[in-house]
Image (spheres, rainbow, N blue to C red):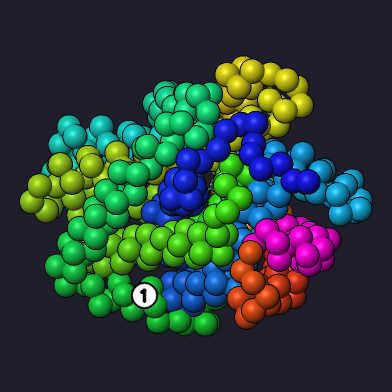
Amino acid sequence: MAATTSIHGMWTSRMAFILAASGSAVGLGNVWRFPYTAGEYGGGAFVLVYLLCVGAIGIPIMMAEIMLGRRGRQSPINTMRTLAQREGRHPAWQLMGWMGILTGFLILSFYSVIAGWTMAYAVRSASGVFVGIDRAGSDAIFGALVGDAERLLAWHTIFMALCVFVVARGVASGLEKSVRFLMPALFLLLVLMVAYAFSTGSFAEGARYLFAPDFDALSAEGVLSAMGQAFFSLSLGMGAIMIYGSYLRSDASIGASSLIIAGMDTLVAILAGLAIFPILFANGMQPEQGPGLVFKVLPIAFGNMPGGVLFSTLFFVLLMLAAWTSGISLLEPMVAWLVENRSFSRVRATVLAGMSVWLLGIACLLSLNQWSDVTIFGKGFLDLLDFLTANILLPVGGLLIAIFAGWMLSRAASADELAMGKGFAYRAWRVLIRYVSPAAVAFVLFHAIGLF
Ligand code: PHE
């Protein structure tokens, strides 16, 4: 008999789960990572592949993750152990949980550094340094921040402390309340930015860049990155959505929730793209700016619009809050495991996990300045972790989840948990999770081997 609740607490409603999972999904991945990777790989064709991946791979895998989490009701490692045992499968399946925890650890270490940038930018916005700024000024401000290891360390420390604070108190209390106002506010500000972008006169050019596919610009690495971006942005492949699913009530619909979460996440990414690319073209900038893209482009727009000080402060504060609700979900799986298996108190487990992530984050932030000439596979440490986690570890995790949910778990079990009836919706999910998603992920990963 499956447990009907989790020892770590439960969401109070299905709505609370949707908010929390959207809080996990919507974050730096949408506003920071999506535009800069789309810019790196030529725009339209990348975006098209990304959207295809969200629909054909992301949504079915999100359903699978929530389903497995809710059936196991524990940290991803113990959930996978329990489910493998119950289904008579090899105990090695729990390694998938371990891999997820490692991946979350690696992602959070650099995610926290970038979240630090948003806080630094909120302070700069409020102090008015962006007013009337031009391209050169914006570049200089970004360069000065990234070059200053001590400042980065201070912000990184604050961000990790914030994540530890919430996770230590338990995800269900606190998190629910904050996401409820945060998501609509971020959404409104993005709409405002799109409206501003519309007034620049380069809106059509930006939209064309984003939506007109030019397949010549798309390399094998571009396809891999589009798929990786889908996993990263939807928080899939490392157990974050799985553990959130383990706090979901048994009677809530998984299919409908997944559609809403994926829909919101994608909408936010598209809005961010529609805001950023027109402003970029209006200022004669190039899309290939790397990770600094959003931080270099947006201040120019804010600096030249009425009310810009207020709007830009709000924007970066909201972005930081969005990063916070994602950071929490990256930390939760390892904390739950420490509580379950090491019988740590939640506070002790969170502090320990947070401190380890913090340490690795220091290597990430130093790779931007002091250690900028140290490269591995031609990339700095932060860039390497970003590439490796999003493009390799998350897709591999997602592939394993699809195989487990589609082939290892009995049909009766998934039909029971998804509770979609035996009609078209369930059958479509089963075809996607058994054939389409694993084949697509494996194919793209396989082709990418040639890149290394
Ligand atoms: N989805 C988050 C974002 O877009 C990042 C994330 C990745 C969170 C993986 C959890 C797990 O910012």
- Magenta highlight on residue 111: no
Quick check: can you spot residue 90?
yes
**Picture residue at 76% right of the left edge, 26% below the top:** 341
**Picture residue at 64% right of the left edge, 39% below the top:** 5
Q: Which residues are magenta?
A: 399-418
Left or right, 414 with respect to 18, comes to right
Left or right, 206 with respect to 221, comes to left
**Picture residue at 75% right of the left edge, 22% below the top:** 342
Compared with residue 162, is residue 309 higher up or lower down, i.e. above or below?
Answer: below
Q: Position of residue 402 (x, y in %)?
A: 73, 63
Q: How many numbered discs sit on the rendered protein?
A: 1
Image quarter of residue 194: bottom left
Under mark 1, the amino acid is Tyr
Quick check: can you spot residue 49?
no
For mark 1, give the secondary structure: helix
- Front residue of this view, candidates 145 and 185: 185
Image quarter hosting the C terminus:
bottom right
Q: Position of residue 244 (x, y in %)?
A: 57, 44
Residue for badge 1: 209
**Picture residue at 52% right of the left edge, 82% below the top:** 215
Q: Residues within 10 Å of mark 1 (few under 14, many from 20)?
A: many
Compared with residue 330, is residue 421 higher up or lower down, i.e. above or below?
Answer: below
Compared with residue 186, is residue 358 higher up or lower down, i.e. above or below?
Answer: above
- Front residue of this view, candidates 407 and 239: 407
- Front residue of this view, candidates 385 and 211: 211
